[in-house]
Amino acid sequence: MSGPAPALSFVIPLYHSATSIGAVVREIEELHVEGGHEIILVNDGSADATGSVARDLVRNARVPITLIEHARNFGEHNAVLTGWRHARGRHIVNLDDDGQNPPAEAVRLWQHAQANGLDVVFGHYEVKQHSAWRNLGSWFTNRMTDWAVDKPTGFYLSSFRCVSAFAAQQVTNYAGPYPYLDGLLLQVTQRLGSIEVRHDVRRSGSSTYTFRRLIQLWLSAWVNFSVLPLRVATVVGMLIAVAGVLSLGLVVWLWATNRGPAFGFGWLMAALLIFSGTQLLMLGLIGEYVGRMFLTVNQRPQAVVREVVSSS
């Protein structure tokens, strides 16, 4: 796409968004952004009519629109990275495809970033229009990242964010198969901000963000950007070892004083289950680290772009 770089790029990952993305794009087209704006749509392997709807939007665009087709579904964070790689704006806002992130609020994020010289501004929702389990998952993710990644304690992270072109360029250098955007952003800059924004009710359809996807996000936050789980495993192992030594001393004392029970099968099995379960947990954790290293070394693709379509 030719022409001067716009001031702001809107990056929207699409997944089964045929009924919602049209209204979102039209609302963005009606915005007045000083310096101009563009829209980057990343169709992340949708199985519905999202692709054809997005192509119609490109053909009838009133602002520059680029559609990027992934060869299959790679996940939201991978799709956002693809969008960032194709964005030309001096700042980039990424928002959801369901209309819950009002484009006017995205402009507020951008204005706050400009006014304060920030590389990243997160939108902090006063009232979240998500299901109870999704809100609980988001709360847990934020608490967990307080421990796992280098961020100010209690600082709210969300997927509704504005980033500078500088920060986006640094983050897109990451080529691993399991990106966690907030962890990557916290590694490249400390110029962070947050403002309260509105969160609207979903306009159509239902969320595709399942509990399985939340688990994958938690693993990416912990395993990709922190060795804290390994340190926790070490401490737990040491505590169990100390408990084992103390228990052995107690058994010897009971045996020497003839105070022990005649049968200890139940206690023995309980102890075996505890120790065996703990060992399997630790092995699984170490295996998760090794497995991700293996996939990275073998260059599992972060995303595969099938096609890029731009408005004239």
Image (tube, rainbow, N blue to C red):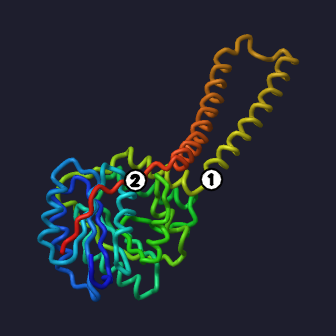
Is 282 left, or right, of 221 in this rendering? Answer: right
Q: Residue furthest right?
A: 256
Q: Amino acid at mark 2?
A: Leu
Relative to 98, residue 238 above or below: above
Q: In this orientation, which residue lies closer to the viewer: 254 or 110?
A: 110
Going 77% across and 37% down the picture, which residue do you hit? 242
Residue 89 figure quarter: bottom left
Q: Earlier in the sequence, mark 1 or mark 2?
A: 2
Identify which amino acid the numbered label 1 is placed on.
Leu
The residue that disc 1 covers is 228
Where residue 230 appears, x then y in whole percent?
A: 64, 47
Q: Is residue 265 above or below residue 66?
A: above
- In the picture, the disc for residue 136 is 2
| Rendering quarter of residue 159 | bottom left
State the separation of the CA atoms marked 1 and 2.
Answer: 22 Å
- Where is residue 224 shown, x and y percent of the image? 54, 54
Please name which of the two marks, 1 or 2, marks the residue nearer to the observer.
Answer: 1
Q: Nearer the viewer, residue 56 or 96?
A: 56
Q: Which quadrant of the rendered structure holds the C terminus? A: bottom left
